[in-house]
Amino acid sequence: MSHALERTPVDVCRQRGEDRMVIGNFGVVRVVRPGKAVTRVKEGDLCLMQAFARTDDHGYVKLVHAYDAPGTIGVLARRTKIGEHLLLPLPKDTRYSLQQWAASYGRYWTAWDNWKVAYACWRSQVRVSPTELDPPPLAFGWGGGVAVAELELAQREGFRVAMASGNPQRLAEIEAKGMIPVDRRLFPDLDHDEERMAADPDHWRRYRQSERTFLKIVNELSGRRGAAVVIDNIGKPVHRATLRALGRQGVLATVGWKHGMRLENVRANECIKRHIHVHTHACCFHDIEEILEFQESSGWMLELGEQRVYQFDEIPELARDYAEGDLDSYFPLFRINEN
């Protein structure tokens, strides 16, 4: 949603050929009035809204509901109209709260899909499981809630996991999940910007110092083997350091592009080190019921503590807080209607 508000990397209104739009493509919604031909859901059902406005032949999203799909209306409205195929009813006897589902499923399902591909790529070159290696291989995360959820799956497979943040509350959240918190403030100038470096040699010096500090931390955490998997949903500022932190047969996995869409790498180095770059987007439409069942049965679910729930009139404040990095949780919540 922040990309839509900032009109970057594309102006989605212009792309859709519309003057204005209502965004918001994930949330727990209640069916108020089903159409006459609707059979999948009924009045009163609580459902997880999906964003698959248009998919390819394999079920992967091409156009996103309430983003780049023309004529679609998102959940940032008191009421909206959604095709029944985009509604997945919640289990009647779910053991999780509506807040847990609302805050997590979009990120967790994206993480599930990305990890499935990234782990398969890693195993395609490594003949043993993570539990057979000593020390365990390192999975490192840059980003937010999706990276957290993906690292939880890495933990389940036997990886040692670590994640970076400069926010004390988030570092505590990472540690509470049994992960290794890496304080981003230890390498504050890890922001690779060629133009700025060319104009300001001192920035290059500070960057190199931060990069050395970061690589030293990764080496210590990985037993000097480098990271086996890096989940990077940040992009350009950390791309150079990420590639240098990847060990042999390492996998760079991403589902996002928060900063910088165009990246460069030395292809010879990536070939020689047998690095695999994984790019995925959302998840597969055909997998959504399987992922829901996996969450419900396995306990792979966000644990929500006390946190603010933004009300409908506070959505602009939520957008500002997100843009300024002023959120205490990786999983912010907003409420459109009281009931």
Image (cartoon, rainbow, N blue to C red):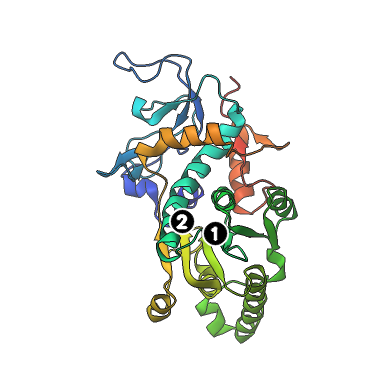
Q: What residue is at 28 percent from the left and 44 percent from the top?
A: 58
- The C terminus: image quadrant: top right
Kind of element beneath mark 2: helix
Image spot of residue 99 (x, y percent): 61, 31
**Which of the two labelled residues, at mark 1 and mark 2, occupies the earlier sequence position?**
2
Q: Is residue 200 left or right of residue 1?
A: right
Residue 52 visible, this orientation: no
Image spot of residue 217 (x, y percent): 67, 71
Furthest toward the bottom, the residue is 201
Residue type beneath disc 2:
Tyr
Q: What residue is at 48 percent from the left and 33 percent from the top?
A: 292
Kind of element beneath mark 1: helix
* Residue of label 2: 119
Furthest toward the left, the residue is 57
Seen from the viewer's position, the closer of residues 231 and 314 is 231
Residue type beneath disc 1:
Pro
Quadrant of residue 184 within the rendered picture: bottom right
Q: What residue is at 51 percent from the left and 79 percent from the top?
A: 195
CA gap between label 1 and label 2 equals 10 Å
* Residue of label 1: 130
Image spot of residue 179 (x, y percent): 67, 54
- Looking at the rendered structure, which numbered label has been put on residue 269? none
Seen from the viewer's position, the closer of residues 21 and 133 is 133
Quadrant of residue 127 within the rendered picture: bottom left
Residue 294 lies, with reference to residue 267, above or below; the image says above
Specify few, some or many for label 2: CA neighbours under 10 Å numbering under 14, 14-19, or 20 or more.
some
